[in-house]
Image (cartoon, rainbow, N blue to C red):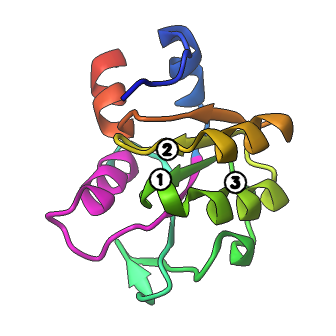
Amino acid sequence: MEKDSHTDEQIRKFYSLKNIVVVGMSKHPEKAAHFVPRYLSDRGYNIVPVNPTADEILGKKCYCKITDVNESIDIVDVFRPSGQVMPVVEDSIKKKPKVIWLQEGIHNQVAEELARNAGIEVVFNRCMLAEHERLF
């Protein structure tokens, strides 16, 4: 699977953004959708979980959907299958994040184009943990 065309310098700049909403964050420590956001949290990022099946993850209140989040959002980090990305992007656009980051293995060209047309940067098929380790 291809990945987006952002340069390393552009990706580094995205890491200067601190408020990250994680859609599909898992309660299960062995899953990437749990240990990737935990890694980011341990490095000073403000993680906001979106998971309608949990009340709290990593000691943080869980929200049912992005539009329920009351604070400003810099990055929407998505752990959902490619076929489920469109509603996430549509909800994200309402909150005006700077970046939508689709984790490794996730790619939806139509949803990505919708986000870009709304002025949102889109990263796809990249892991936030792996990229952070590689660049820092």
Tell me whether circle 2 and circle 1 mark residues in contact (CB < 8 Å): yes
**Figure disc tally:** 3
Q: Identify the secondary structure beneath mark 3.
A: loop
Q: Nearer the viewer, mark 3 or mark 1?
A: 1
State left or right for residue 2 relative to residue 110: left
Question: Which quadrant of the view contains residue 118?
Answer: top right
Picture coordinates of residue 70 (x, y %)?
A: 75, 72
Tell me whether circle 2 and circle 3 mark residues in contact (CB < 8 Å): no
Q: Quadrant of the C terminus?
A: top left
User: Which residue does the image show at 14% across and 64% down from the upper left?
Assistant: 30
In front: 43, or 79? 79
Mark 2 = which residue? 102
Q: Amino acid at mark 2?
A: Leu
Residue farthest to the left, as pictured:
30
Picture coordinates of residue 105 (x, y %)?
A: 35, 42
User: Which residue does the image show at 48% across and 47% down from the upper left?
Assistant: 45
Q: CA distance from mark 2 to mark 3?
A: 15 Å
Q: Identify the secondary structure beneath mark 1.
A: helix
- Which badge, 3 or 1, is on the more N-terminal residue? 3
Q: Does residue 135 show up magenta in the picture?
A: no
Q: Amino acid at mark 3?
A: Ile
Q: Amino acid at mark 1?
A: Ser
Mark 3 = which residue? 73
Residues packed near mark 3 inside 10 Å, few (<14), some (14 to 19) or many (20 plus): many
Picture coordinates of residue 125 (x, y %)?
A: 41, 35
Mark 1 = which residue? 82
Q: CA distance from mark 3 to mark 1?
A: 21 Å
Write the start and end of the magenta stretch as one range. Answer: 19-41
In front: 60, or 121? 121
